[in-house]
């Protein structure tokens, strides 16, 4: 009789542990899911993470409903999602490595777990299969991590499901694999948050360095000297143009200094004020016979300051200004496949006559534009050269260009 009571008590305790661990895990996963889902501008990396959380929640719900076999299948599917997350974490920009080997290995292990669940039913062998799955994860972290220090969190997190796998092998009635997976996913998310904080810090440092470079590039002593000299000549030749020229010169300088203190996106039309001031100032200088034609299909968006003006400057000085051919610059905006596309094109052939110092100056200016686009809005700049001139194309994700707070 006493043995029966002990067995009943043990069974009740085990059931309580199973249900409690599943309920706690569901609450934790739901909270993390909401936080991760609301991350602004979700990357492919965080999407894979959300898939892993969703699968784990499904398994926990099956465990609550006492469908343990289905729960095991869901827990097994979390790891392929994590493998994709790991691949995205390790992959550098423009790198094609996709982790096919590890995905194939994990897929075979999932099939093995499903077979164990379907035909064996033995808690020992099922838990052993999970243990093998997590040993594969640890091997992947040790072998494929570019910097082992970045995978310490992953290795720490994987210790939880490894431990719960051992529990399942020793105590067949305890179903805590879902809790182990939950702790694994929690530690991954803490690591993700730490990565984002470090990335934000790096962006701020790079932006600070970029400001210094912008200052050196935008405030050209030679250009300022020529502009002031030409304004002085206008006072003798055409005094009516002096005031507009001074206003354009003042606007040009003010917009440059404003851009150096602005770390947020600015409206497109505000950037165009800078462009127009520069164009008006350039047109009073000798040998700057050109027209600027605008075709704006979209105007209500934001972009980093000092992104269009340097490209227009390049078109004036190194496109048309360095060539006997061409006298037109075209500035266009459009919405295309979820991107705001801005095009600055000239019909000159200045690249053929550039000297080395001019190429260096233009290269630095273009690099500054690329840096600001990448850091502030995940945008990109491409340059296309042909016999018909040069075309600079800016692409900004539409969801990053709709608010000044981006």
Image (spheres, rainbow, N blue to C red):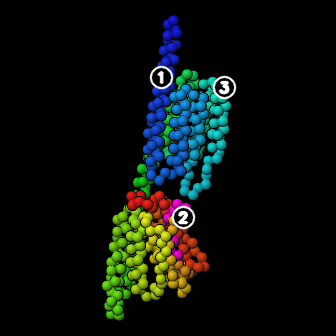
For label 3, the residue is: 120
Secondary structure that dominates the magenta span = strand
Q: Residues within 10 Å of mark 1 (few under 14, many from 20)?
A: few
Where on the picture, by quarter, is residue 283?
bottom left
- Name above or below for residue 210 compared with residue 112: below
Q: Which residues are magenta?
A: 336-345
Counting from the top left corner in percent of width and height, residue 98 is at 61, 50
Question: Which residue is nearer to you in this view: 239 or 223?
Answer: 239
Q: Which residue is located at x 47 percent, y 58 percent?
A: 399
Q: Which residue is located at x 54 percent, y 36 percent?
A: 58
Counting from the top left corner in percent of width and height, residue 326 is at 54, 84
Q: Is residue 341 magenta?
A: yes
For label 2, the residue is: 336
Rounded to the nearest angstrom, the CA distance separating label 3 from label 1 is: 25 Å
For label 1, the residue is: 16
- Name above or below for residue 60 compared with residue 258: above
Drawn side of residue 194 relative to residue 147, left or right: left
Question: Which residue is nearer to you in this view: 133 or 181?
Answer: 181
Residue 166 visible in the current orientation: no
Rounded to the nearest angstrom, the CA distance separating label 2 from label 1 is: 56 Å
- Name above or below for residue 103 compared with residue 242: above
Of mark 3 and mark 2, the one earlier in the sequence is 3
Question: Which residue is nearer to you in this view: 212 or 261?
Answer: 261
Which of the two marks, 2 or 1, is nearer to us in this view? 2
Which of the two marks, 3 or 2, is nearer to us in this view? 2
Q: Which residue is located at x 64 percent, y 29 percent?
A: 117
Of mark 3 and mark 1, the one earlier in the sequence is 1
């Amino acid at each position: 009789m006493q043995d029966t009571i002990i067995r009943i008590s043990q069974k009740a305790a085990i059931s309580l542990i199973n249900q409690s661990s599943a309920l706690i895990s569901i609450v934790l996963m739901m909270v993390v899911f909401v936080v991760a889902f609301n991350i602004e501008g979700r990357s492919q990396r965080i999407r894979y993470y959300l898939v892993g959380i969703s699968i784990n929640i499904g398994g926990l719900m099956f465990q609550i409903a006492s469908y343990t076999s289905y729960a095991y299948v869901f827990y097994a599917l979390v790891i392929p999602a994590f493998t994709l997350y790991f691949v995205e974490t390790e992959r550098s920009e423009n790198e094609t490595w996709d982790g096919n080997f590890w995905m194939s290995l994990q897929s075979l292990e999932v099939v093995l777990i499903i077979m164990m669940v379907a035909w064996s039913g033995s808690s020992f062998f099922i838990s052993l299969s999970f243990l093998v799955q997590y040993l594969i994860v640890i091997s992947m972290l040790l072998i494929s991590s570019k910097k082992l220090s970045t995978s310490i969190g992953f290795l720490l997190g994987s210790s939880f499901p490894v431990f719960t796998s051992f529990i399942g092998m020793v105590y067949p009635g305890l179903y805590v694999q879902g809790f182990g997976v939950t702790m694994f996913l929690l530690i991954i998310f803490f690591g993700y948050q730490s990565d984002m904080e470090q990335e934000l810090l790096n962006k701020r440092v790079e932006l600070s360095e970029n400001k210094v470079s912008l200052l050196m590039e935008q405030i050209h002593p030679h250009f300022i000297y020529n502009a002031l000299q030409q304004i002085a000549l206008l006072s003798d030749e055409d005094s009516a143009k002096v005031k507009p020229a001074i206003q354009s010169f003042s606007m040009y300088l003010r917009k440059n200094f404003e851009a150096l203190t602005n770390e947020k996106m600015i409206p497109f039309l505000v950037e165009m004020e800078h462009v127009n001031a520069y164009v008006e100032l350039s047109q009073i200088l000798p040998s700057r016979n050109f027209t600027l034609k605008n075709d704006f299909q979209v105007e209500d968006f934001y972009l980093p300051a000092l992104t269009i003006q340097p490209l227009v400057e390049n078109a004036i000085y190194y496109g048309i200004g360095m060539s006997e051919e061409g006298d037109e610059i075209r500035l266009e905006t459009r919405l295309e496949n979820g991107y705001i596309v801005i095009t600055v094109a000239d019909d000159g052939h200045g690249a053929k006559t550039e000297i080395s110092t001019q190429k260096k100056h233009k290269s630095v200016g273009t690099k500054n534009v690329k840096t600001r686009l990448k850091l502030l809005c995940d945008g990109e700049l491409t340059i296309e050269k042909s016999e018909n001139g040069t075309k600079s194309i800016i692409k900004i994700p539409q969801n990053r260009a709709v608010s000044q707070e981006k």
